[in-house]
Amino acid sequence: MIEVRQLRKRFGDQQVLDGVDLTIERGESLVIIGRSGGGKSVLLKHLVGLTHPDSGQVLVEGQDIAQLDERELLGVRRKFGMLFQSAALFDSLTVEENIAFVLARERKHTPEEIARRVAEALEMVDLPGTQKKKPAELSGGMRKRVGLARAIIYRPEVVFYDEPTTGLDPVVADSIDKLILRVCNRLRVTSIVVTHDMRSMQTVGRRVAMLHEGRIYATGTPQEMMSSADPVVSRFVRGISDEKEHTF
Amino acid sequence: MLDLPVQIIRGVLAGLGRFSLMVMEVVRSLATQRLSGRDLVAQMYFIGVKSQTVVLVTGAFTGMVLCAQTYFQFHKVKMDTATLAVVSVSMCGELGPVLTALMVAGRVGASMAAELGTMKVTEQVDALRTLAAHPIDYLVVPRVLATVLAVPLLTAESVTMGILSAYLVGVHLLQIDPGYSVVNMLRFTDHRDVLMGFIKSLIFGGIIATTGCYKGMHCGQGAEGVGHSTTEAVVYASIAVLMSNFFLTLLLTRLLALL
């Protein structure tokens, strides 16, 4: 469904993506792992068309979205839903208005239908009855749930998750992982999750791709990655730092 | 040695290019996209209704001080009753539009840059894009249109308040003859002065909103980036208003003379 060919992106002197090749099949649940600052989120933004590459292709059902302008991309993005690392809820709108944003702008649905679908989406993310709250009144985990409800209410074909468990305590992080699985199974959507949380990777991933030095370094199932003998993969999944490294 | 000037020129040209593209996208959106009436009314309320106090106070005190200063000079040559005429012509064609625009730039331009800048750094603009909404359509167009509509109305209020205040100061405080003053004011204030003020205020509204939105949409990272953008929005919009006012005066005086 999505194919990335020789994707390159440079910011200043830093070559963040250096020839990424990746294929994502319809309905699969792919987890992209890699070091902080290694370009995972940049890759994700290329997949959604939020960033344009220096060179390379991002093919969505055969169409190269890297060649489309912002207005042409709007149609393609209707197939996508995205949960941002910070949830990125609109501060000035209530939970209900945030979730109903796309439906309200389409002007094709009655207020009753929109209210029903918002309630359904909130039910799915275990936050019923929070329609009138403002984002500022919600905790980090609740914001992510609302962000997910906003991303799935219009039934996208692909849902992207940018570090969905970052900044959450282990219990809330686990509940978000279970929610991602639930959304994936119930709505039969393609899930692409960017994370460096190994527990999350094992819970939500069917296939894992590791980004290292600007390229896809290794792919496999979560089990294969966890038991990999490759020193780069092994050190990363076990969280072992190089003694010579002082990146903190 | 030439690297720094070249970089600066390149940066300025790149900025002007991005600004032009944004303005073109706004025009394209106005021509092709359906505008949400609710968003427009919300912006009109914030930009127009909420700016009234500051604009009315500015207009009133500008009219009063202009009246007093003009009277002090004209009184020496026994031209007291021409005072309101000077106030009226100045307020309609120059001071009303310029001072209103400067006050709106300070209040609204800064607010637009800060709000859109915060939305950008907190990924809310990216979220909009993933929700298949063009940021220009949803964020910029309602603000630009509302400002272009609101600034002429605010200018009219400011001018009216300035002339009324000048009348009160002139007639009741400085004892100028009210009948002759009003007759002279109506005689010397041409419809072209009013039209000039109206055209200027439309253009100033566009300058303030596009500058504020551009600075917000292209702000740097973090709180520092938002702070810089907010300051730059006010400074650039104010300078652009003052500079364009000079050229507009020259241009419009000639064009309106043909009417």
Image (cartoon, coloured by chain):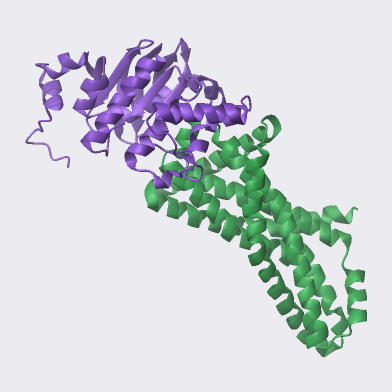
Chain colours: A purple, B green
Residue A38 seen in this snapshot: no
- Residue at left 53%, top 33%? A101
Q: Give the camera-side residue of A242 and B192.
A: A242
How many discs mark residues in the rendered view? 0
Position of residue A1 measured from the top left corner of the image (x, y, whole percent)? 41, 11
Q: Give the camera-side residue of B38 and A218.
A: B38
Q: Give the camera-side residue of A31 and A56.
A: A31
Where is B164 relative to B39, above or below?
A: below
Where is B48 relative to B64, above or below?
A: above
Q: Quadrant of residue A242?
A: top left
Q: Quadrant of residue B187?
A: bottom right
Q: Residue furthest front?
A: A129
- Residue at left 41%, top 50%? B225
- Residue at left 89%, top 75%? B182
Residue B99 seen in this snapshot: yes
- Residue at left 68%, top 32%? B34
Q: Give the camera-side residue of A170 and A53.
A: A170
Q: Residue furthest left?
A: A243
Position of residue B179 measured from the top left corner of the image (x, y, whole percent)? 92, 80
A204 with respect to B116 (left or right): left
B73 with respect to A158 (left or right): right
B186 with respect to A61 (left or right): right
